[in-house]
Image (spheres, rainbow, N blue to C red):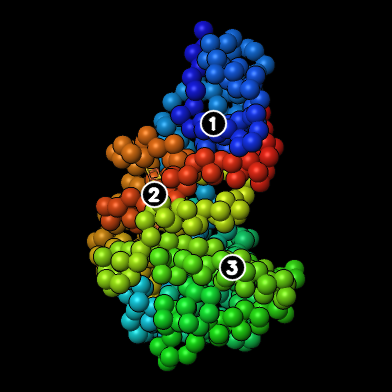
Amino acid sequence: MLKLKYSRYNHLVKIPDEEAFVLVNFRTGALIRLSPLQKAVFDQATELPAAAKAIKRLRQGGFLVDYDELRHMRTQMLTAGGSGRALGLTICPTLACNFRCPYCFEQARSGRMSQEVQDSIVAFAQTNMEKFALNRLTVTWFGGEPLLCPDIIESLSARLMEVCQKLGAGYEAGIFTNGWFLTEENLALLERRKVNTIQLTLDGASPETNDHLRREAGGGSSFTRIMENIKKMRPYAGTSAPNVVMRYNMNRENAPYFGELAAKIDAVARETGVNITAYPAKMDSSMENPQHIRESALSIDEYGDLASPRSVKNVRNPVNFRRLYCKAQYIHGYAIDEVGDMYKCLELVGRKEYVMGNVRNFSLFKEPGEGIENMDRFFETIFPEEDKECMSCKAFPLCLGGCPRKRVAGERGCMSLKSDLDGYTLARYRKIGSKSYNG
Ligand code: SF4
Ligand code: SF4
């Protein structure tokens, strides 16, 4: 007889002020509302005949299983790391930056990407897309500040778009920019070169609360200028409007102002039609940061309390099991700096100790060169089997063991939801009802 057991990722919460419960499965995303009678059936479910209608539905939702879920996730996650048909390139035309943010751990240096490195990137994209039959190229412009080199974005984009056209492949792009150089001319360039996702950062809700954290080298008010620049996106609101995301690096000092900034951003979105939303990210508290930044870092629980109402609001449904944490774990994902050095994670750009090769001669087919273990270490993070806490954590299907860069550095990047699974479940229920149960 088939032996069913409860999924390790079921989570049951009593709905406040109602005689009912929400049952969610974090692996499948299935979510149902249970009356007290249905809960009583659920409590007995492993004793009931597998052919019963209610049991079949619970199996379809993944609430009851007859297999090892962790083992199955491992198969899916490892497969995801090596499959997929897109080439993801994060390209840094320069590591120079006109900002001096006190928490930034990027390795700023002067210099621009040479023509030779640009040629190598085009050749690398073409060779890899052909050899692996990839049908899409996704480019992320990163730095330093990439808009210090708009000419490189223009010409390299044009060449990469041409490669895609020749191969019949899709092309899309995004940019991480501090926003200072979002002039009308550069916005037109981004639109022309299919840069349809723009990530900006503000860390306060006014010049007084933002500018000491987002510090422009020349002393200008980054808050004032960036808010003005966002309004310049108005001509692009419409069918080709970019998705603009405003990141807010939150610590104890600036946490009280996030709501105010989010309201200002929402007002600009309404007024201009620009597709922009603000979200809070936990400000990094690594040892490389100055002491005052480390001291104002939020703990994971504090961050969870402050951030989760908004992050839950932004959750798209259903929350079906993701298979990779980020593109650093994907075989065809690379970050390339201005001298052609390659990394798995964009946050490590410029750090010699994490270089895995150079785009001039890197190939997955050749005998590994110096630094290749930096690639291997990232693949080992895909399914962190040796981490007992992750293996027994109910949030694992949502979190997948956290940021691979942190794991490679010997840390664990727990997601804030871990500390409030009840709140997360109820917020999802209120947002989407029980419709995500496909059973
Ligand atoms: S490894 Fe971490 S820091 Fe790097 S891209 Fe992935 S999530 Fe971001
Ligand atoms: S990193 Fe933390 S939240 Fe994520 S699965 Fe591991 S223990 Fe859970």
Identify the residue shown where x is 29% and y is 52%: 411
Q: Is residue 177 visible?
A: no
**Which three-letter amino acid code belongs to the residue tagged 2?**
Cys
- Residue occupying the far front of the picture: 17
The residue tagged 1 is 12
Identify the residue shown where x is 61% and y is 84%: 228
**Which three-letter amino acid code belongs to the residue tagged 3?**
Ala
- Residue occupying the far top of the picture: 1
The residue tagged 3 is 262
- For this rendering, which residue is in front, 27 or 171? 27
Ligand 2: image quarter: top left
Mark 2 residue element: loop
Relative to 65, say whether 426 is above or below: below
Relative to 56, say whether 62 is above or below: below
- Residue occupying the far right of the picture: 238
Closer mark to the observer between disc 1 and disc 2: 1
Mark 3 residue element: helix
Q: Residues within 10 Å of mark 2 (few under 14, many from 20)?
A: some
Q: Earlier in the sequence, mark 2 or mark 3?
A: 3
Rendering coords of residue 19 (x, y %): 65, 29
Determine whether label 2 and label 3 are within 8 Å by CB: no
Rendering coords of residue 167 (x, y %): 59, 61
Relative to 328, say whether 57 is above or below: above
Q: Distance from label 2 to label 3 (Cα)?
A: 24 Å
Label for residue 414? 2
Q: Residues within 10 Å of mark 1 (few under 14, many from 20)?
A: many
Rendering coords of residue 38 (x, y %): 64, 21
Q: Earlier in the sequence, mark 1 or mark 3?
A: 1
**Assess mark 2: CB under 8 A from ligand 2?**
yes
